[in-house]
Image (cartoon, helix red, strand yellow):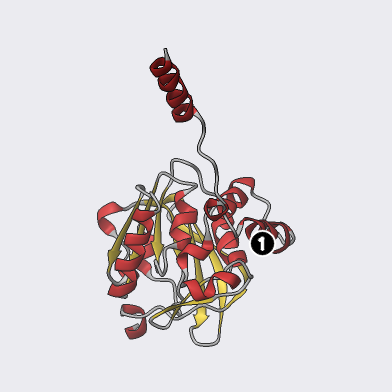
Amino acid sequence: MKNVSLIIAFLIILLLPPLQSHAQEDPFKEARQRMIEKDLKGRDISDPKVLSAMEKVKRHLFVNKDLWNVAYNDHPLTIGEGQTISQPYIVALMTQCLRLKPTDKVLEIGTGSGYQAAVLAELVDKVYSIEIKKGLAKKASAKLKDLGYRNIEVKQGDGYFGWPEHAPFDAVIVTCAPDNIPPPLTKQLKEGGRLIIPVGETLLYQTLTLVTKVKGTLQVERISGVRFVPMTGEAERK
C-alpha cells in the first residue's frame, strides 16, 4: 500500500505544471510593451498584426548583451562590421507599408542581425534574406534557427541582384540604402507586389520609398525621411 501511495504521489508531481523561476521570466517584457505603446502605437503604427509581431520578437536577442538594457529604446544599435539594427519604429513602419498577407513570400535585402527577418516571419509564409557580409549572414542564420524560425532562408551575397531562383516575390524590403532602385528587385516583384526601400544620398539622408507594381508599371510613393547604412557591392559601382 505504501508503494502504491508513493507511485501516485510521484505521478501527481510529474503532471503538475513546472514552476516558473524568476530567471525564466522575460525581464524585458515591460520594456517591450512600453516600446509598443509609446513608439509604435503612439505614432502611426496601427496594424494589429504588425504590432503583435513586434511584441513577440525579442529585440534584445539580436544585439550583444552589453546593449540589452537599451534594446527597446527607439534608436538604431550597432551589430558589428559597420552595420546597425534599425530602430523599432522604422522596422514596424516598413513592415506595415508592405500590407503583408499570411501567404506572402518576401525577399529581404540586408539581413543584418536577423531582427527584421524574424518580424516578417511572424507574418508571412516564407522569408528569403540576403546579407552581403559573410560573418553577419552566418551569425544571423544561426540565431534565427536557434529561435525556431523554419520559414526563413538566409544566404550570403549581393542583394542588388535579388534572388531570382525564388522569384517572383509578393514583397521586397531593403534595409540598406542605394542611390537608385535596383532594377533586378523590381523585376522580381509579382504583379501587385510591393517594394519598400530607402533611396538617396547614402551617407547622409534618404527617402523611404514604397514601390507598387501595377500592370507592369511602377507606382512610387514617398513615405518619410530616413537614414540607413549604404548598400554595398554592385550598388556602389552603379
Q: Amino acid at mark 1?
A: Met
From the viewer's perspective, tell me whether residue 74 is left or right of residue 184: right
- Residue at 36 percent of width and 84 percent of height: 236
Residues 88 and 5: in front is 5
Query: What is the secondary structure assignment of the residue under circle 1?
Result: helix
- Tell me residue 43's x, y (percent): 72, 62
Q: Residue at x 54, y 41 (%)?
A: 19
* Res. 182 image quadrant: bottom left
Q: Residue at x 63, y 70 (%)?
A: 73
Task: Tell me, yes or no, if residue 213 can be seen here.
Answer: no
Is 142 left or right of 35, judged from the image as shown?
A: left
Residue 223 can be seen, yes or no: yes
As drawn, 107 above or below 48: below
Query: Whole-percent x and y of residue 86?
Result: 53, 71
The location of residue 237, given as percent across then percent down, is: 32, 85
Q: Residues within 10 Å of mark 1 (few under 14, many from 20)?
A: many
Tell me the residue that label 1 is attached to: 35
Residue drawn at x 64%, y 49% as measured from the top left: 47
Q: Nearer the viewer, residue 192 or 223?
A: 223
For the N terminus, the image quarter is top left
In-image side of 28 versus 184 (left or right): right
Seen as rendered, the residue at the extreme top is: 1
